[in-house]
Image (spheres, rainbow, N blue to C red):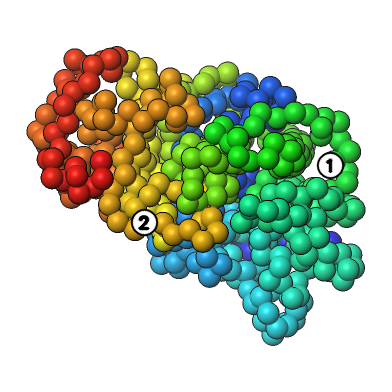
């Protein structure tokens, strides 16, 4: 059962487009996974089959360090939709009632105003989709589940659904996906509601329950949530008007936990491969690690096969040569990294400042993009918002924080901007900034308030400190796993990076950025987050261009002591 909704364009823009015949403006396709970490492609793990990502990278450009605005579903997707940095759009967390405000313009509205046929499928996390309790979706007396605010957001066609974590709360179908399960049989719907409880085991020492799932579902593969999303996407692409450019955002539910897979997926070749264990994880049972990593890999590979099907549907229309395709994720996944070093937090899920959480795979191909290029510089995924507008002929609002990387896509040089990621919710207060410097090394500064989190949830019985600044600095080129904190050795690098942090993290307490030798930006000054480093900045760094010498910090001793440096 396919439940899709269409709203046809009206007004002069649509009329003019139709009169002019088929436009040559390109199409744009975003294939967005949920919780896919940056180093889980075959570029870093040769045993992992990410064939579609590899194809896009080979025919286009791969970004080695794509950084999300905030490592949490709703905020990350709200930034992409609005072009605003976290927390300007007001979506601070992934609470089930958090929604993008109606008065915030979206890229979908702006594209639609220019005659682009806009579509979304799957778990976009921008709004609730209708009533979750009471009358079923098919009732004529309530907004159809999945339709709520879809037109207002700027979509012409959609098939939206909730993610897997909503399942236990659903007493009746609440979106087109669960409605389609109920149509197969009420038992199939009930099985989905209970899938984490049925297929996963709550092991001793774990707070999370959706990571160790040794049992498999017997449900048909075509009703697995990611397969359903991909089919909806292919159908919408096939049915889209052919006389105007289209945009579609495909939002998978996986590989987000619970790591439940089907019997069909378990039986595919290669399930029993051995995977590298999490680093600093001797206290995490290796058998459990292999289980969670095998299921995580299987979910990724399943989505990669589905991405290939969607690209085939574009090619079947005859549009592939005029279509930009980008594959990425909304944030990463800790997968147990730092297990031995984190007494307060359970290092699973996201909501952490480390690369496994804030960095994602990203590759794009399309007209004019040179094949096989790899961009080493950190790039912000939020910048896709402005890039898409430019690619499809829409103006970028002055209010946007997003800055187009259209020229970078087409072979231009990176402009030196810092990529930031932040979070400001209880027990998770941090800001990060990273940039590639003139010596070729990528440096990352981390500023946390209270404690630097290592995952979404606190360990049982633990409380996180709520005050004081924690500062960390890493040379990601030499130390990609973030094992060696170099903040005290190279405070001059931190003083450059900290200028891109905003809000509560401006200055990061004891990091002195008022010194005129680093640009003269005083603590508390406004910063647009896209600071281009001045000649003064570079002069400060030149004596240490390879960062082999330490310089004394300009921090006041009293401030340093107060911050626990």
Residue in the image at 37% along x and 53% along y: 429
Residue 39 picture location, percent across and down: 58, 31
Please tell me whether residue 42 is drawn above or below residue 211 in the rendered image: above
Badge 1, how many Cα within 10 Å: few under 14, some, many 20+?
some
Residue 243 picture location, percent across and down: 64, 46
For disc 1, the marked residue is 265
Please indicate, yes or no, whether residue 470 appears anywhere in the rendered image: yes
Residue 79 picture location, percent across and down: 45, 51
Q: Secondary structure at mark 2?
A: loop
Q: Of discs 2 and 1, which sits in the foreground?
A: 2
Badge 2, how many Cα within 10 Å: few under 14, some, many 20+?
few
Sequence-earlier tag: 2 or 1: 1
Residue in the image at 69% along x and 36% along y: 286
Which of the two residues, 562 or 541, is positioned nearer the viewer here?
562
Please tell me whether residue 303 is drawn above or below residue 425 in the rendered image: above
Q: Secondary structure at mark 1?
A: helix
Please tell me whether residue 41 is drawn above or below residue 508 in the rendered image: above
> Could you tell whether 308 is left or right of 119 in the image?
right
Please indicate, yes or no, whether residue 68 appears anywhere in the rendered image: no
Per the model, the C-alpha gap separating discs 2 and 1 is: 42 Å
Residue in the image at 86% along x and 64% along y: 188
For disc 2, the marked residue is 465
> Could you tell whether 517 is left or right of 429 in the image?
left
Residue 527 picture location, percent across and down: 24, 45
Split into 4 quadrants, where in the image is the C terminus? top left
Residue in the image at 88% along x and 46% along y: 263
**In the figure, residue 130 lies in which quadrant?**
bottom right
Which label is found at residue 332? none
Report the residue that reaches farthest toward the left: 516
Which of the two residues, 477 or 16, is positioned nearer the viewer here?
477
Which of the two residues, 175 or 339, is positioned nearer the viewer here?
339
């Amino acid at each position: 059962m396919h439940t899709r909704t269409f709203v046809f364009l009206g007004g002069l823009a649509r009329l003019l487009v139709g009169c002019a015949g088929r436009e040559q403006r390109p199409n744009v396709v975003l294939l967005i996974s949920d919780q896919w970490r940056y180093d889980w492609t075959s570029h870093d793990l040769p045993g992992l089959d990410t064939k579609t990502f590899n194809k896009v990278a080979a025919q286009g450009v791969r970004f080695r360090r794509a950084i999300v605005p905030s490592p949490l579903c709703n905020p990350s997707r709200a930034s992409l939709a609005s072009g605003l940095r976290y927390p300007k759009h007001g979506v601070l967390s992934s609470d089930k009632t958090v929604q993008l405000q109606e008065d915030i313009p979206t890229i979908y509205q702006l594209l639609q105003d220019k005659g682009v046929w806009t579509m979304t499928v799957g778990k976009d996390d921008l709004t609730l989709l209708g009533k979750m309790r009471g009358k079923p979706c098919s009732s004529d007396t309530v907004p159809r589940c999945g339709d709520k605010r879809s037109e207002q957001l700027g979509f012409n066609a959609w098939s939206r659904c909730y993610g897997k974590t909503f399942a236990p709360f659903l007493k009746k179908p609440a979106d087109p996906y669960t409605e389609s399960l109920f149509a197969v049989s009420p038992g199939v719907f009930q099985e989905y509601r209970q899938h984490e409880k049925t297929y996963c085991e709550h092991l001793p020492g774990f707070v999370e329950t959706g990571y160790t799932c040794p049992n498999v579902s017997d449900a048909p593969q075509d009703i697995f949530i990611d397969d359903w999303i991909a089919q909806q996407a292919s159908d919408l692409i096939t049915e889209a008007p052919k006389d105007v450019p289209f945009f579609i955002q495909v939002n998978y539910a996986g590989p987000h936990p619970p790591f439940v897979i089907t019997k069909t997926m378990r039986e595919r070749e290669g399930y029993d491969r051995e995977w590298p264990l999490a680093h600093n994880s001797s206290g995490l049972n290796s058998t459990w690690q292999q289980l969670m990593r095998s299921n995580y890999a299987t979910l990724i590979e399943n989505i990669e096969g589905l991405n290939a099907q969607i690209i085939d549907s574009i090619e079947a229309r005859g549009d592939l040569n005029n279509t930009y395709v980008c594959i990425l994720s909304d944030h990463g996944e800790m997968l147990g990294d730092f297990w031995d070093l984190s007494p307060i937090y359970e290092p699973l899920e996201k909501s952490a400042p480390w690369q496994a959480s804030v960095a994602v795979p990203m590759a794009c191909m399309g007209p004019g993009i040179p094949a096989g290029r790899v961009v080493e510089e950190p790039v912000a995924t939020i910048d896709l918002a402005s890039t898409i507008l430019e690619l499809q002929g829409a103006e970028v609002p002055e209010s946007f924080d997003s800055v187009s990387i259209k020229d970078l896509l087409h072979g231009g040089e990176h402009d030196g901007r810092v990529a930031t990621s932040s979070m400001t919710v209880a027990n998770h207060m941090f800001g990060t900034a990273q940039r590639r410097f003139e010596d070729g090394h990528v440096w990352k500064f981390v500023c946390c308030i209270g404690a630097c989190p290592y995952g979404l949830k606190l360990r049982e019985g633990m409380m996180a400190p709520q005050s004081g600044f924690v500062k960390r600095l890493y040379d990601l080129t030499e130390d990609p796993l973030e094992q060696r904190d170099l903040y005290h050795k190279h405070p001059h690098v931190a003083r450059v990076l900290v200028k891109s942090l905003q809000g509560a993290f401006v200055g990061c307490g004891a990091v002195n950025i008022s010194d005129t030798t680093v640009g003269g930006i005083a603590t508390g000054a406004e910063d647009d987050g896209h600071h281009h480093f001045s000649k003064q900045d570079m002069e400060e760094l030149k004596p240490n261009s390879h960062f082999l010498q330490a310089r004394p910090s300009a921090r006041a001793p009293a401030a340093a002591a107060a911050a626990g440096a």
